[in-house]
Amino acid sequence: MTDKQKVRDLESITNSYNDQHLMVITDLNSNQLSKQQISDFIKDIISDEQENSVVTASDGKIFCLDTSNADNISSGTLDEARLPKSGVTEGEYQYPVDLKVNDKGQIISVAAGQPGGNNADASLSNLNQEGEKHFLNKSQITNCILEAPNGVVSYDNNIITIKAGLKILFPNGRNADRTLKNYEYTFNSDLIREYPTNSFNNGLLCVGLNLQTNQIEQSVPSANVIRKGKSSQLPDNYSGYFFNIDTNYINFYTEGILNSEYIYTFIADNISFKNGNVITLNEYSPLELLKQTDKVEITSWSFPDSSKAINLTLLASGQSYTQPVDGYYAISKTAGIQNGYVSMYSGGLGYTCPSPNAAGSCVLSIKTLKNVSCVINYNATGDVNYFKFIPAKGAVNE
């Protein structure tokens, strides 16, 4: 055989396996780099270990094992069993812990953890008490609507429907650190109630939850049977709802006896029935936060809203009047007699307007809190020019 002959010019050696045949290795310029007998070359590249894929056949030829070393040697796809193992089982690891990586960048140890600790889930629903301090949380709010994806409530004739999806917070006591404690409830379906056919004004939509049975119900009590205050302000033998700001409970009392099975909240007011049908209902809105830029609006809330004034009938002298919202009583009455007067008293304050002559008018007003009575005394005998209650702007939802 001639040296420096290009491999492509050599005669076919497909059937050559005689030990005397030579293999010549050249560079790109056909310069001989080495030559050796084929048998010796085969011995150099064949290992006795079966982990190698190249072996010698019985006819002396070499071939690649296609058992466990490669799915298809021509495509270069290796069997996963032949690849280096990291020791980690394939899968998804939520809240991973004990993560270890070797010097080759392989993950050699990992385990699935649990929500909590240093792991916050996507909704931040598993924050601990310390973490929640960075946000407005449910220990700072109570007695409110959180979400109303389908609206709060609707009415049709004498039927009131609380909407599915409504999420509310029931006041449910206080925590050991005196922060507010709540019971969060979501309506999975509409809560529907048909009310008796009667006439009724100034009602509130009350939602009651039995904590023992998880039974939920709705009712429409009069706004006159609802009070709010400290424990010391609960009247003796009281009947009605009382929102105790000391304990953070809305409870129902019957002649001073507490019904402890239920907790309550309210989601609408100004409910009126006429001829058996609901004619007005003002639903509450989901929780909103006040901003510094709202101060101008807030300042106006304590002033009278004349557009919502309610005309009243003046009763006999010495009678009392009560309204379900904060506001002002205003009266103008002709004296009718010399030194005729009209007086108003509410919340420990009183005002009197006398008239020195019969043709004059006694005109005055007084501010009152909701459910706090106002007593009117008078000796004036003339006509009532007007007698009305004007709600405070911030006391009535738009």
Image (spheres, rainbow, N blue to C red):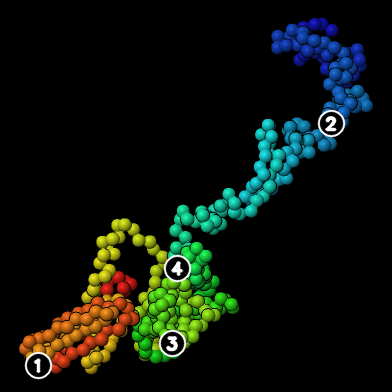
Which label belongs to residue 237? 3
Q: CA distance from mark 4 to mark 2?
A: 71 Å
CB atoms at circles 1 and 2 under 8 Å apart?
no
Question: Mark number for residue 51?
Answer: 2
Q: Which residue is mark 4?
A: 142
- The residue that appears at 16% across and 92% down in the rendered structure is 379
Q: Which circle's residue, 3 or 2, is located before the other in the chain?
A: 2
**Image point 76% across, 15% down: which residue?**
8
- Checking the image for residue 337, the label placed there is 1
Image quadrant for the C terminus?
Answer: bottom left
Of callouts 1 and 2, which one flags the residue occurring earlier in the amino acid sequence? 2
Of marks 3 and 2, the one in the foreground:
3
Q: Element under label 4?
A: loop
Q: In which quadrant of the rendered image does the N terminus lie?
A: top right
Answer with left or right where residue 314 lies relative to residue 65: left
Q: Work out how far the residue at label 3 is from the one at label 4, CA to CA, in angstroms.
A: 27 Å
The reply, left or right, for residue 172 in relation to residue 345 is right
Q: Nearer the viewer, mark 1 or mark 3?
A: 3
